[in-house]
Amino acid sequence: MVLTGGTSGIGRIAASDLAAQGATVAVIGRDRTRGETLVADATALDGDIRFHQADLATQATVRSLGAELRDTYDRIDALVHNAGLSSRNRTETEDGLELTFAVNQLAPYLLTYELLDRLRISAPSRVVVTASDIHRRATLDFDDLQFTNDYDSLQAYARSKLATIAFTLELADRLDNTEITANCFHPGFVPSTNLFRDSPIWTRIMIRAAAIIPGIGTTPQEGARRLCKLVTAPEFGEQTGTYVTGNGPTSPSKAAADPENRERLWRTSADLVGIESDWP
C-alpha cells in the first residue's frame, strides 16, 4: 500500500494501523526524521512500514517517486492520496503552479498516472483520496483556476478539495470494469492536524477555538479509521466513485459531481502536468 502524507496526522496513525494488520505500507513524506521514526516505531507490527522521501509540490519529484515505487514494488494493492496543505500566501512551485492546487490535486493526478500499471497488475486494487466537506463552499472557476487574482487561502484549499473529488469520480468512471475502485472521503474536522500550519493567523485562531468546542472536531484516530475503512473494507473493493463521510456514502456538491466539470478538470490537469488526457 502506498500512502502519501503518512508521517503526521491521520496518515501516520493509518500507516501504523494498516501495518498492524499485516500490510507493507510505503509511506511518502517530506520529513526524513519523522519518516525514520515511524519506521523504527513499526518494528513490532505484523506488517512493515517503509519510508520514501518526496516533496509532492514539484512534478519532477512526483515522476521520480513514481519510478522509485515501480522499481521497489512489483504490485500496489492500494494507492492512498492523503498528503495535503493550505498555503497562507499565493506561492508558485518550480513548475509555475499555485502550491495548494499543485499538491492537493495535481500530485495525486500525476502519481496515479505513474502507478496505474502497478494497480492494474494488482487488481482488484484501490485508489483512495482524502477529500473534505469544505469542498461544498468552492467553485471551479476555469478562467482563474489557480487564484491568480484575489487569492484566499481557505478558498484555495476548498477548491483543491473540490477538484480532488471531481478527479476521483472521473477516475472511477474511466476505470469502470477494470477491478480498480476509486473512492474519496471526508476525514472530519481534525483540529490537531498540521494541515493549516501555513494559513493566516485568523484561520489558525479559528481552528484552535473550534478545537475546544465539544462536538465540533473529529479525533485523528477517527479520521484514520475512515481512511483505513476505504482501504480494507470489502464493500469498497466493489463500490467505486463514492464520497464517504462519517454518515457513510454521501452525495458531494453538484460542482464535484457534474460530468462537464469533471471532464474539463481532467483535461486541464493533464495539460498542467504535461501528459495526454486520454488515460487510463
Image (cartoon, rainbow, N blue to C red):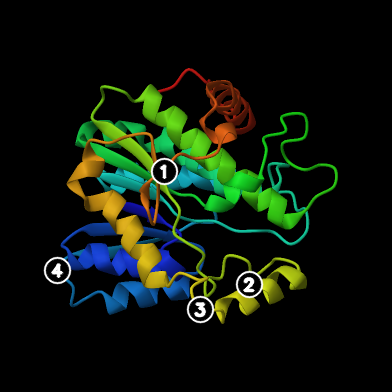
Q: How far apart are marks 4 and 2 (CA)?
A: 36 Å
Disc 3, SS: loop
Seen at 72% across and 36% down, the residue is 145
Residue density around tag 1, few if under 14, some if 14–19, many if 20 or more, within 10 Å: few
Mark 2, residue position: 207
The local secondary structure at tag 4 comes to loop
> Residue 34's image quarter?
bottom left
Q: Residue 46 carries which label?
A: 4
Residue lying at 46% horizontally and 60% vertically, measured from the top left:
5
Which label's residue is closer to the chain start, 1 or 2?
2
Question: In the figure, residue 169 lies in which quadrant?
Answer: top left
**Residue at mark 3:** 214
Residue 200 found in image quarter: bottom right
Residue kind at label 1, given as amino acid type: Thr
In the image, what residue type sits under mark 3?
A: Pro
Image location of residue 214, percent across then percent down = 51, 78
Residue 2 horizontal side relative to residue 47, left or right: right
- Residue under circle 1? 250
* Residue projecting furthest to the bottom: 212
Q: Tag 1's secondary structure?
A: loop
Task: Answer whether residue 7 is visible to the viewer in this image.
Answer: no
Q: Which residue is drawn at 41% across and 45% down?
A: 184
Of the two numbered discs 1 and 2 in the rendering, the one whose residue sits closer to the viewer = 1
The amino acid marked with disc number 4 is Asp
Earlier in the chain: of badge 4 and badge 3, it is 4
Residue lying at the far top of the rendered structure: 278
